Amino acid sequence: MRIDILTLFPQMMSMFFEESIIMRAQKKGLVEVHFHNLHDYSLTRYGSVDDYPYGGNAGMVMAVEPLANCIEALQNERSYDEVIYTAPDGNLFSQGMANELSMKGNMIILCGHYKGIDERIREHFITREISIGDYVLTGGELAAAVMCDAVIRLIPGVIGDEQSALSDSFQDGLLAPPEYTRPAEFRGWRVPDVLLSGNHAKIEQWRYEQALERTRLRRPDLLDNNGQ
């Protein structure tokens, strides 16, 4: 997989991808992440990428020319499965969406800023608009990092135990059940006996029941969405 991130702050973005699992995935050659400074595609002397909106609205808008120039330069080099725009009015990011995107080959992620981008970019280049929540950030860089993290960890070989990713919260429409590790008793607090029993059928049944109960208490909307 190759991910090209279009941003005004490539140095801020690169720091996130130089640590932990995401860094190891790149070293293994399982994913390539490239950052493109949109200032480099400006047609102005000072590298500006924004302008006042027509109609006199407050704030600034990312201009059409540098965005189009950058996207087209990349598309002239290779084909892309998705050109994603991080937008507060986009479709809400979900585990299912992360699963789907993890199967893609090449993706462009455009990090929004200011009051957004010229609508013509959305109309002619963007294939998918994604929001990570019902709130507004100063820029789309954090949203892009969140999406990349959720997607890259699902690529086969990124996580040592691939079954771990498949048992995460939301993969089956439920929150994950409680987890315990050694010691079996700490300050009188015991691990549930069923987890120590070695009976895998009972353990799986216990995990399902716990996941169902936790979801019912914390995220009942998930049960409604899945008809449970």
Image (cartoon, rainbow, N blue to C red):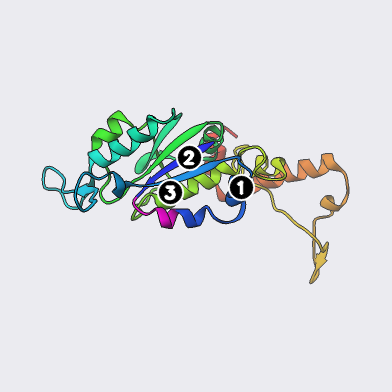
User: Which numbered disc flags the more N-terminal residue, 3 or 1?
Assistant: 1
Q: Amino acid at mark 2?
A: Ile
What residue would you read off at disc 1? 27
What residue would you read off at disc 2? 3
In magenta segment, residue 10: yes
First to last magenta residue range: 8-13
Q: Is residue 20 above or below residue 131?
A: below
Magenta stretch: helix, strand or loop mostly: helix
Position of residue 227 measured from the top left corner of the image (x, y, whole percent): 57, 32
How far apart, in angstroms, are the residues tagged by discs 3 and 1?
A: 23 Å
Name the residue at 46% across, 44% down. Answer: 34
How far apart, in angstroms, are the residues tagged by discs 3 and 2?
A: 14 Å
- Quarter of the rendering containing residue 72: top left
Quadrant location, the N terminus:
top right
Crowding at label 2, few (<14), some or many (≥20) Cα neighbours within 10 Å?
many
User: Which numbered disc flags the more N-terminal residue, 2 or 1?
Assistant: 2
What residue would you read off at disc 3? 143
- Nearest the viewer among 127 and 7 is 7
Q: Is residue 21 above or below residue 95?
A: below
Q: Amino acid at mark 3?
A: Ala
Crowding at label 3, few (<14), some or many (≥20) Cα neighbours within 10 Å?
many
Position of residue 155 measured from the top left corner of the image (x, y, whole percent): 61, 38
